[in-house]
Amino acid sequence: MTTPTLAPMLAVTEYARRVREHLADLAPDDVTELTEGMEADLVEAILELPGADPETMPTLEQVEARFGPPAAYAAELRAAAGLPSGTPSDTKLRGLHGLAASLRTRERNASRELQDRLAAQPWWPGFRELALTMRPVWWVLRAYVLAMIGQAYGAGPVPDSAARWLWLLVLLTLSVQWGRGRIGTGRLWSGVGLCASVLAALVALPVIDWVTEQRVVYDTYPEVEYAESGPGVFMDGEQVRSFHAFDPQGNPIEEFLLFDDLGRPVVTVPLANDEFYVGGSEELWHAVPPLDVYGTAVWNSYPLQLGRWNWLTWDEATERWVAVPASEGKLFTPVRPFERAIPLEAAVTTGEEEDVAGQGADDGAPATSDEVLDGELPGDSDGVATDAPDDPDSGDGAEPGRGADTDALVDEASPGSDGEPSAGSSTEG
Amino acid sequence: MDTTQLLKGVLDAAVLAVIADEDGYGYDVVRRLRTAGLEEVGDASVYGTLRRLYSAGALTSYVVPSDEGPHRKYYGINDQGRAALAVQRKEWREFSTTLTGLLDKEAAR
């Protein structure tokens, strides 16, 4: 065996280094296996060239003249060893692009295997087409996720500054252009792009989770208020303060006790000390319940009686507010929303002998059912009794506005018009 | 005719045959192939082939230390390699017989 000297080793070492550089995307073990003893082989081959002098240092050009360019040599090694071919590149960033290329190579191998398996599935072609069509969604999501990294906690799903908006736009442009293959096709930038994509994929869920959590807080805040039904009676999420009842003829029932189907008293003032603001008044008002025959406060007696705080005193014995003697007459019952409800059909047709129109008849004469119904339906000149309940306009006649349409059914608006706040408006406030 | 293209298909058989004859290290195999007449065989092709055959289990390898030069990684053939070589020999014979017959018949016209 010829003894290699130091001289030819230098160019050979450099040549071998360049070859290994072109194999950098392979697993380190593969590179070692493939190029182990390469220098020795090269030196031996060089020394066998005609006219080779062991004492003369060959130039790199001479080495290349014998073995070809390092890139070609590396490609030949790969091809013969059955390893994937790399992309030729002259960039100096070997570590980064080596990593990216190695990732790409592994990804390529794995995805080829996966593709073969998937291609056998009947649903694959349609799914693949859909996924390809949806790729822009990922491009946008990727840019958004990256742009939102580092946004101040709780700042919400929208960029919180002009700078971040700008950053989002820049990332969007880059992401879409990269996705379309318009930029970053070089090794360095495809490595950067790959890293950014992996990062975006990793943090996408936490970011989206965080974003939706923000949105939930904003959206449900009012819902939480509505849903908080608590003690008392609620209708469409709003607390009911009092009830007004009407008999089948539509006449108000002055006082009544209300129970539910389980026999529980229906109480709109769950705590005796609950306060009301009435009709825009700055003053506090309290409910003042009547007593039953045993001297116990009855909280399900309606309509509710109200008293202003400075008219009242707390009665320990009955656990309720009671009017101080000087203010006894001042307690008031909130006015009804309307003085009469529309009578029931049965009540009108079977009660013709009674004054079913009651106080509603202006002329004071006994009213017939036809009169009542004519009054109730002013636009319907030949209205007959059987038409009335089916008429869509009269179906919701329990509304104040509807009832107030007709003189026949409406008395003076408010018995409480003696300077006291109108309870009609109190229910609004 | 571009013999490098032809060589690609039969390099495995050639390398196995050389090693079956006698163990050898990388450049040694190159040299013997060339001496045998395959002058256009590429160094890297031979090294890559050695590596692939070794990975496939057709070759064994061992390092021979050297006092005066670098240590050498020698390759030897094993049973699996011999079996592969036998198959390739048979295939080559059939193929070359077929092609020879075909080419000679064409030439005889």
Image (cartoon, helix red, strand yellow):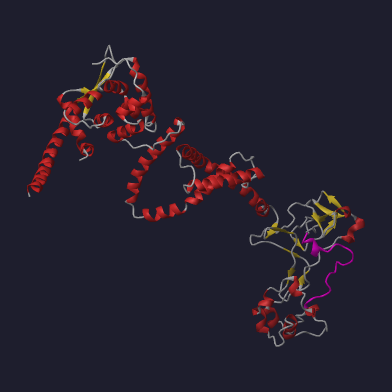
Q: Where is residue A29 in the image (x, y as percent from the top left)?
A: 35, 27
Q: Which of A154 and A167 is in front in this view?
A: A167
Q: Which of A409 and A68 is in front in this view?
A: A68
The furthest residue to the right: A326
- Using the rendered image of the protein, determine whether residue B78 is visible from the camera's viewpoint: no
Whether B94 is drawn above or below B32: the answer is below
Q: Does the magenta stretch include residue A416?
A: yes
Give the extent of the magenta segment.
A409-429
Whether A196 is drawn above or below A51: the answer is below
Query: Does residue B108 appear left or right of residue A135 in this picture?
Result: left
The N terminus of chain A lies in quadrant: top left
Q: Is residue B109 magenta?
A: no
Whether A16 is drawn above or below A343: the answer is above
Q: Nearer the viewer, residue A49 or A9?
A: A49
Q: Position of residue A234 (x, y in %)?
A: 69, 58
Q: In which quarter of the image is residue A28?
A: top left
Residue shown at 7%/47% (left/top)?
B108
Query: Does residue A94 appear left or right of residue A113 in this picture?
Result: right
The furthest residue to the front: A51
Q: In which quarter of the image is residue A303?
A: bottom right
- Using the rendered image of the protein, determine whether residue A197 is visible from the camera's viewpoint: yes
The furthest residue to the bottom: A382
The furthest residue to the top: B67
Q: In which quarter of the image is residue A415?
A: bottom right
Dominant secondary structure (helix, strand or loop) of the stretch shown in magenta: loop
Whether A271 is drawn above or below A62: the answer is below
Q: Which of A377 and A260 is in front in this view?
A: A377
Q: Position of residue A123 (x, y in %)?
A: 37, 55
The C terminus of chain A lies in quadrant: bottom right
Query: Does residue A4 appear left or right of residue A216 in this picture?
Result: left
Residue shown at 89%/64% (left/top)?
A419
